Image (cartoon, rainbow, N blue to C red):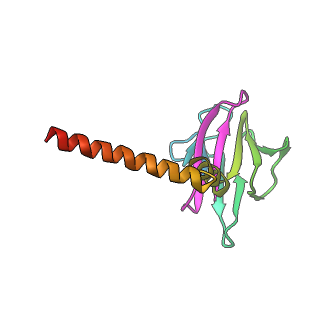
């Protein structure tokens, strides 16, 4: 599974989309697109991502006016999506990131590395709950 991040030339994030559950994702300016990019150089139906039988995502240009590019080379046919692939649609870059890797990094940041730190957090939480319970008893 992938996450797509759309950025302009100044690297401002314009949008994000997680590819989970869909089989076809249309990209473009049009209202009927699943991932809308608001830029005049992007066609109404610029391209699409399709999940094919073997679990591989592919991108294809839908005959857009300004084309789709990888490393400034125009696309020719279906392009398999892989982690860290960057596509350019006009002035907008689409970066494909591995969703599992991103989620793993987020979980690592939340979960302490050693058991002692986790135990300290649990003890502190339990003490806070005990104090709150004592306050409730005092007020009642």
**Over which residues does the magenta segment extend?**
1-25
**Quadrant in the picture for the C terminus:** top left
- The outermost residue toward the left is 140
Where in the figure is residue 24, as x and y percent of width and height? 59, 59
| Most frequent secondary structure within the magenta stretch | strand
**Quadrant in the picture for the N terminus:** bottom right
Q: How many marks?
A: 0
In the image, 70 versus 41, the foreground residue is 70
Is 130 left, or right, of 45 in this rendering? left
Q: Is residue 88 magenta?
A: no
Where in the figure is residue 23, as x and y percent of width and height? 58, 63
Residue at the spot 38% in from the left edge and 46% down from the top edge: 127
Residue at the spot 52% in from the left edge and 53% down from the top edge: 119
Is 64 left, or right, of 111 in this rendering? right
Q: Is residue 23 magenta?
A: yes
Residue at the spot 69% in from the left edge and 31% down from the top edge: 8
For residue 6, what is the image quadrant?
Answer: top right
Where in the figure is residue 61, as x and y percent of width and height? 71, 51
| 98 w.r.t. 53: above or below | above
Where in the figure is residue 43, as x and y percent of width and height? 65, 40
Whether residue 64 is visible, yes or no, is no
Is 77 left, or right, of 129 in this rendering? right
Whether residue 48 is visible, yes or no, is yes
């Amino acid at each position: 599974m992938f996450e797509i991040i759309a950025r302009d030339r100044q690297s401002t994030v314009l949008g994000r989309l997680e590819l989970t559950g869909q089989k076809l994702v249309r990209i473009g300016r049009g209202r009927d697109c699943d991932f809308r990019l608001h830029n005049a150089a992007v066609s109404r139906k610029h391209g699409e991502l399709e999940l094919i039988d073997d679990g591989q995502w592919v991108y294809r240009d839908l005959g857009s006016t300004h084309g789709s590019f990888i490393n400034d080379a125009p696309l020719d046919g279906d392009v398999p999506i892989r982690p860290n692939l960057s596509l350019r649609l006009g002035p907008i870059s689409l970066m494909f990131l591995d969703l599992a890797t991103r989620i793993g990094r987020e979980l690592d940041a939340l979960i302490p590395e050693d058991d002692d730190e986790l135990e300290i957090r649990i003890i502190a939480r339990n003490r806070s709950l005990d104090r709150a319970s004592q306050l409730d008893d005092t007020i009642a």
